[in-house]
Amino acid sequence: MRVCRYPSPLGNLLIAEEGDAVVYCQWEDSVDERIIATWEEDKEQQNALLTMACCQLTEYFAGKRKVFDLPIRLNGTPFQQIVWKGLQQIPYGETLSYADLAHQIGRHKAARAVGNANHHNPLMIIIPCHRVVASNGKMGGYAGGIARKAWLLEKEKGNE
């Protein structure tokens, strides 16, 4: 797996590709160092797919991109796959509750399981798990931290 570091306004993101698909985009400070120690870093920016992912992230953070157009591959359980596909349907600048997302994917009583799948999203920002909030309108959780989630939501609302 090849990986690069993307310096976002909220801290470094680690982006990894394997087999011509982006498979990983996580905040560097939330990643187990033992995992990334086995990856090959693309320090010279030779990998076209990683470069494209970085360019699209730059456009996103500049408010010029609302949807990512990258080949991705998601590795997860069938339920996680359904949830992650549901996340991709949440429009830029909008939010959905965990319960609403559960209802949307046809699993009406699975709000907690949706939250768990959301937490394991391997492609943060690219698959917008930050757009899911609690039913009472509060932030809920976010693997990258609540401050990052709040910043992302505010940024999207300001760029609609």
Image (cartoon, rainbow, N blue to C red):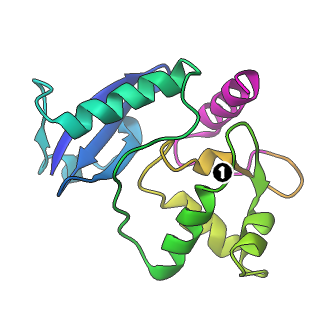
Q: Which residue is mark 1?
A: 141
* Residue 90 appears left or right of 100: left
Choose between 64 and 114: the one closer to the eye. 64
At 38% from the left and 64% from the top, the residue drawn is 74
- Regarding mark 1 in the picture, which secondary structure is present there? loop
Location of the C terminus (image quadrant): top right
* Residue 127 appears left or right of 34: right
Q: How many numbered circles does the render carry?
A: 1
Residue 125, compared with residue 79, is above or below; it is above
Residue 151, compared with residue 144, is above or below; it is above
At 51% from the left and 72% from the top, the residue drawn is 80
At 62% from the left and 64% from the top, the residue drawn is 86
Q: Position of residue 148 (x, y in %)?
A: 59, 32
Q: Position of residue 145 (x, y in %)?
A: 58, 40
Choose between 40 and 57: the one closer to the eye. 57
Residue 96, compared with residue 151, is above or below; it is below
Q: Is residue 10 visible?
A: no
Look at the image and say whether residue 148 sits in the magenta stretch.
Answer: yes
Choose between 119 and 54: the one closer to the eye. 54
Please give the range of residues in magenta. Answer: 139-160
Q: Residue furthest front?
A: 69
At 15% from the left and 52% from the top, the residue drawn is 1
Q: Quadrant of residue 94?
A: top right
Q: Is residue 96 visible?
A: yes
Q: Position of residue 92 (x, y in %)?
A: 67, 39
Q: Quadrant of residue 158?
A: top right
Mark 1: give few (<14), some (14-19) or many (20+) Cα within 10 Å: some
Look at the image and say whether residue 30 sits in the magenta stretch.
Answer: no
Q: Position of residue 120 (x, y in %)?
A: 48, 61
> Label 1 sits on what residue type?
Gly
